[in-house]
């Protein structure tokens, strides 16, 4: 897994690319989020456009990231869910926890 990091209008966007599975992508995601929290980044947008699959461990890491940022006073939102990832979030009812968007500009606007 690869993670790109960029800022747009005060929002830190993590462009995730690849599968988020046990042993693959978990550490990278955890480190990226932990660094953002340390740097006092409070508006985080996870871009799932290039994430074809996420297993239960990957899902757990996304939830841990959400909790970690929230404890620091921040907010995590998700944009561009692929069908498989959206189905997983729906089945687990986590779709009701995360604020999700199909359009990056609308997601960024929602932080204001």
Image (tube, rainbow, N blue to C red):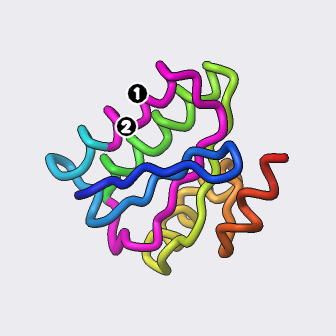
Q: Nearer the viewer, residue 5 or 45?
A: 5
Question: What residue appears at the point 52 percent right and 54 percent down from the top-left corner?
Answer: 46
Q: Position of residue 74 (x, y in %)?
A: 67, 30
Q: Quadrant where the N terminus lies?
A: bottom left
Classify mark 1: helix, strand or loop: helix
Check residue 100 for magenta coloring.
no
Asked if residue 66 lies left or right of residue 1, the reply is right
Q: Where is 11 relative to 46, above or below?
A: above
Q: Residue furthest bottom?
A: 83
Question: What residue appears at the point 65 percent right and 51 percent down from the top-left corner?
Answer: 98
For label 2, the residue is 32
Packing grade of label 1 (10 A; few <14, some 14-19, many >=20) is few
Q: Residue furthest left?
A: 23
Q: Residue furthest right?
A: 112
Q: Nearer the viewer, residue 34 or 63?
A: 34
Asked if residue 29 lies left or right of residue 71, the reply is left
Q: Nearer the viewer, residue 24 or 3?
A: 3
Question: What residue appears at the point 66 percent right and 74 percent down from the top-left corner?
Answer: 102
Q: Where is 30 relative to 103, above or below?
A: above
Magenta region: which residues? 29-54
Classify mark 2: helix, strand or loop: helix
For label 1, the residue is 35
Q: Position of residue 109 (x, y in %)?
A: 80, 58
Residues at marks 2 and 1, CA–CA distance in whole angstroms: 5 Å
Asked if residue 16 lies left or right of residue 7, the reply is left
Q: Answer yes or no: do the residues labelled 2 and 1 have beta carbons within 8 Å?
A: yes
Packing grade of label 2 (10 A; few <14, some 14-19, many >=20) is some
Q: Position of residue 41 (x, y in %)?
A: 58, 30
């Amino acid at each position: 897994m690869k993670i790109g990091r960029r800022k747009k209008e005060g929002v830190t966007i993590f462009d995730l690319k690849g599968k988020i599975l046990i042993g693959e992508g978990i550490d990278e995601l955890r480190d990226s989020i932990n660094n953002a929290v340390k740097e006092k980044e409070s508006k985080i947008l996870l871009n799932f456009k290039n994430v074809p699959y996420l297993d239960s461990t990957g899902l757990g890491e996304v939830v841990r990231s959400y909790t970690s940022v929230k404890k620091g006073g921040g907010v995590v939102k998700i944009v561009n869910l692929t069908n498989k990832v959206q189905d997983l979030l729906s089945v687990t009812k986590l779709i009701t926890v995360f604020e999700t968007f199909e359009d990056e500009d609308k997601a960024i606007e929602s932080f204001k």
